[in-house]
Every structure is written in C-alpha cells, then in structure tokens.
Image (tube, grey):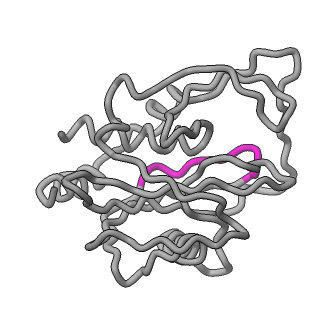
C-alpha cells in the first residue's frame, strides 16, 4: 500500500480529470419540476476530507450520513467537511471539520494532495477535496448533531468500472432525478459527493 500511496501522491501533483470525471456522475432531472438554484452571493469556501487508511490489506476511507434536517443535504451521504472559517485555508478547514464531525485526530494525518475544486450548486459552496493518509485505523467518534452514521468505503472496490449504478431518486422531496451513484453499506451516494469520488476513482485506475 505504501508504494500505491506514493504513486497517488505523485499523480495528484499532475493535471486532474476534473469535469471529465464529475460529469459522468451528474444527476439529470426527469420530471416536470426542475431545480432552479440562483444565488445572489459568490460561492462560500469549504473543504472535505478523504482520509485513506489501511485495514485488513485494503485502503478505506470514511463517509458520513447527515441527520434529517431542513436543508439542502438532509439525510445525504457526504465526505466529512464543511465551510471555512475566516482566514482558513482548505487543509485547515478539512482537518478541523473532520475532527469536529467524526473525531479524526489531525496529528495522525499526512496531506498527500487535493482534487479539483467543486462547486456545490444547491448550497452555494466551492469545495476543495483534501486527500490525506492516516498511519493507523482511525477511531471514529461521531458528533450526533452532525452525523447519524459513519460509513466505510473501500477505495479499490469503488474504483471498479462496474461500481457505478443508476436509478431515479427524489431530491428535496420534490425533484425527480436520474442519478448515477455509488452504493456503500446500503446507502446511495450521489450528487456532489459521488462526483468528487469519481475523480478519485479515475486517478486510482490510472495508477493501479
């Protein structure tokens, strides 16, 4: 795994697939109602964390399921992360949010790169995905106010060509969407998170 991580770190320094990978996972409206997101303010900065660790000979990383609430991402599966505080860079934001949400200790992590910045249209965030490695299997301590469940994704399983599924979902209780997605521990991972992860999957297939 160490050799693979070194190749991944080097690959993240090169041009990234970006929109080529993102667009393959973009949900398409299929019903008469279509979301129409208009924002009067510029996107707010944010960051998410992809925390790779080795367990039982596999590279894994955590995702979280959000609690149900009145908001754009209620009940959805996402990467740990959130909005930047004033004067924070993306790495600081991603590490702080992951510690607050699921208890990952920043001192045990090593930053190996970033993926392409991603505009999350419904919530008006420009998100930077930060990729780190952890030197041990993390002990997750989820904050119940922000996390209803921690999921474990297997990187190489997710990166297989046949890992992408497609089905109709209802977004925000209103909009029917045909959504390419991943299925992880029985949960549907779609939208911005799936698009970000698909870029990582493209990179993994490049270097395996």
In percent of width and height, residue 191 lies at: 62, 38
* Residue sticking out furthest to the bottom: 107
x and y, in percent, of residue 201 in the image: 36, 39
Q: What residue appears at the point 26 percent right and 35 percent down from the top-left corner?
A: 205
Whole-percent x, y for residue 169 in the image: 71, 26
Residue in the picture at 82% in, 38% down:
172
Judge whether residue 190 is colored magenta: no
What percent of the width, then of the height, locates residue 72? 79, 48
Q: Is residue 18 left or right of residue 149?
A: left
Is 117 inside the magenta-drawn segment?
Answer: yes
Please state the total of marks drawn on the protein image: 0
The quadrant of the image that shows the N terminus is bottom left
Q: Nearer the viewer, residue 5 or 58?
A: 58
Q: Look at 54% across and 59% down and name the residue there.
A: 150
| Residue 176, above or below 18 | above
Q: Residue at x 87, y 30 (%)?
A: 174
For the magenta stretch, what is the residue range? 115-124
Q: Is residue 134 left or right of residue 148?
A: left
**Which quarter of the picture shows residue 66?**
bottom right
Q: Relative to residue 42, is residue 33 drawn left or right?
A: right
Q: Quadrant of the C terminus?
A: top left
**In the image, farthest residue toward the left:** 3
Nearer-the-camera pick, 100 or 10: 100
Helix, strand or loop for the magenta stretch, by majority: loop
Q: Quadrant of residue 144?
A: bottom right
As drawn, 111 above or below 161: below
């Amino acid at each position: 795994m160490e050799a693979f991580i070194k190749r991944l770190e080097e690959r993240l320094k090169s041009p990234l697939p970006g929109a080529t990978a993102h667009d393959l996972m973009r949900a398409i409206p299929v019903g008469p109602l279509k979301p129409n997101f208009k924002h009067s303010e510029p996107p707010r900065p944010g960051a998410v964390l992809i925390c790779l660790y080795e367990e039982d000979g596999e590279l894994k990383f955590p995702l979280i399921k959000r609690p149900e609430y009145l908001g754009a991402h209620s009940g959805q599966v996402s990467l740990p992360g959130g909005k930047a505080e004033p004067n924070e860079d993306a790495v600081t934001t991603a590490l702080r949010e992951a510690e607050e949400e699921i208890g990952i200790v920043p001192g045990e992590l090593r930053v190996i790169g970033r993926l392409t910045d991603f505009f999350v249209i419904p919530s008006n965030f420009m998100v930077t995905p930060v990729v780190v490695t952890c030197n041990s299997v993390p002990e997750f301590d989820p904050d119940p106010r922000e996390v209803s469940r921690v999921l474990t994704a297997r990187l190489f399983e997710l990166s297989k060509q046949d890992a992408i599924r497609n089905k109709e979902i209802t977004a925000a209780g209103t909009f029917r969407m045909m959504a390419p997605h991943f299925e992880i521990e029985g949960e549907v991972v779609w939208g911005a998170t799936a698009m970000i992860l698909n870029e990582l999957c493209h990179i993994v297939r490049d270097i395996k």
